Image (cartoon, grey):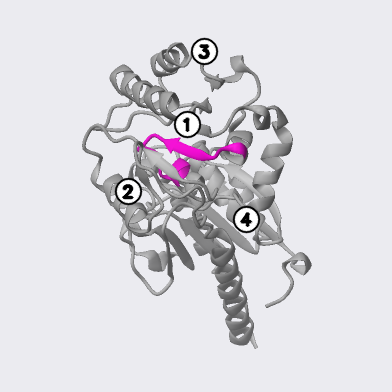
Amino acid sequence: MPDVSALQGECWVITDRAAGNQRQALALAGRLGLRVHHLIWEPRAPWSWFAPCLLPGYKRALAPGQRQRLTPPWPRVVIGCGRASSLFTRMLRKLSRRRSFVVQILDPRIDPRYWDMVIAPRHDGVDGSNVITTLGSLNPIDATWLDDGRDASPVLGDLPQPRVGVLLGGPRKHWPLDATYAQTLAEQLLARHRAEGGSVMVVASRRTPDEAVRLLREALRGVPGLVWGGSQDGNNPYPGVLGWADRLVVTPDSVNMLSEACAVGCPVHTLVTAPLPAKIERFHRVLREAGLLHDLDADVATQQTPLRELPAVAKEVLARMHAHERDANTTTL
């Protein structure tokens, strides 16, 4: 396989505005050694209702100003993540006459044969000869990323140990992250802090209800650490929290946050107070069976083998991309 630093051509990353989808697609694109263009495309109705099916007039799923991208020269690689992008990645494979190597991340909800490659976590249940199955979601976290996080927030290194990072997601359909959940989480964090000391570093996400942040901020008043609820609290300390944490506590709703926590290498805990949606429950079960996820009150080893799947996935993407291009060149001879 050639040195990725020598690769030529462009990689288009197509996502909606969801931070989790952007993070996965950009993490993979960053490993391929190509020039990356990130396109935030969201299909218009009625095409959005049936994505990724190619209804008549499918180009009009894009606004007029965006359609100018749908002409040659085509990118060498296209990467999409999420249902909205699956319409456009499938569209570009057709329009480029398969000159572009097209990768779709997450279950596209139809037969994966419409893409050159599909990357989906095991709990999505996607099968096919062109499917790569991962345990969690793709992310950029490795030793260098964590070093950079520590360098960006050196003050967190002065907090007393054990430093407990708490990552807050948000409510999902049929699963609440509400004031009651926040209160229960705060009580268990305080009980463990009374037993072992240390500090608590809480980071909310865009989906975290304000009331949950307020309750945790009040409950943890006087405990060394921080509660970050948004830009009003300064720059997001998320990379520094992951870099300095001796242990991580993650709300059970977010596949991306759980995957990123498991990539750090410290123990990862969660608090489940109500039945989870079936797909999320399957993901939790896989992590627990792998020894990567534990109850909040569990005592586990201070270090764990980090879950870092991106390098192997990127290597496989490059191998299949080169095979695809060799086949295309042979066909045209």
Q: Which label number is shown at residue 300?
A: none
Amino acid at the residue labelled 1: Val
Q: Earlier in the sequence, mark 1 or mark 2?
A: 1
Q: Please tell me whether mark 3 or mark 1 is closer to you in this view.
A: 3
Are the residues tagged 2 and 3 within 8 Å (C-beta)?
no
Measured in 3D between alpha carbons, the distance from the residue under mark 3 to the one under mark 1, in whole angstroms, is 16 Å
N-term mark: 4 or 2: 4
Q: Which residues are magenta?
A: 244-258
The residue wearing badge 1 is 166
The residue to which callout 4 is attached is 29
Which mark is nearer the camera, 4 or 2? Answer: 2
Q: Quadrant of the C terminus?
A: bottom right
What's the mark number on residue 222?
A: 3
**Disc 3 on helix, strand or loop?**
loop
Above or below for 252 versus 179: below
Task: Give SS at disc 2.
Answer: helix
Q: Whole-percent x and y of residue 97?
A: 54, 68
Residue 299 part of the magenta-drawn span: no
Residue at figure coordinates x 25%, y 32% from the top left: 273
Quadrant in which residue 181 is drawn: top left
Q: Name the kind of residue labelled 4 in the image.
A: Ala
* Circle 4: element type: helix
Q: Residue at x 42, y 31 (%)?
A: 169
